[in-house]
Amino acid sequence: MVINCDTINERENMKNIGFILMICMMSFIQVACDNEEPGQMSVTSDMFLQITNRKVKVSNDGKYYILTECIDETAEVSQVRNVFIVDLEEDAAKVAALNAEYVLVGGVGQRTDYRPANGENGDAYYMLKITSLSQAN
């Protein structure tokens, strides 16, 4: 049995080159993902709100339908007014079809930075995906 030293050296060299390439790729991947903190989520549960049968006042800011939640103004505890922005065309068509000043709405809202022209700082703003919509009495 004859062992060719050239073949063994070539195998060792290929293993070394493969190891070096793997180290280079791992450092490249680490640099590419370096701006993401482990455990730091970009989406949290407080960014969403599920609503059912909320009485809202309908308005339009020229771009979107704005559904402003009716809250009890006489309550002793200060309340945050939720403002729902209807940005989906099919949902906007539903709101337009009702042609009402007040509606009962249900759906899922995602917190947004968009503010209508008459928006107030103390309000909470959500883009709304409507699941139920009816005219309020």
Image: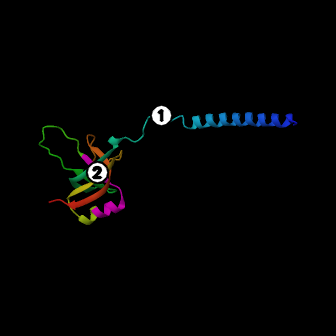
Q: Secondary structure at mark 1?
A: loop
Task: Say which of 21 and 134 sits in front.
Answer: 21
Q: Is residue 57 magenta?
A: no
Determine the CA span between mark 2 and mark 1.
Answer: 32 Å
- List the residue tagged with mark 2: 84
Range of magenta residues: 82-94
Above or below, comparing residue 131 to residue 114 in the picture: below
- The reply to whether dot 2 and dot 1 touch (C-beta < 8 Å) is no
Circle on res. 101: none
Amino acid found under the numbered disc labelled 1: Pro
Q: Which quadrant of the view contains residue 93? A: bottom left
Residue 111: % across, % down: 34, 45
- List the residue tagged with mark 1: 38
| Mark closer to the chain start, 2 or 1 | 1
Q: How many marks?
A: 2
Residue 114: % across, % down: 35, 47
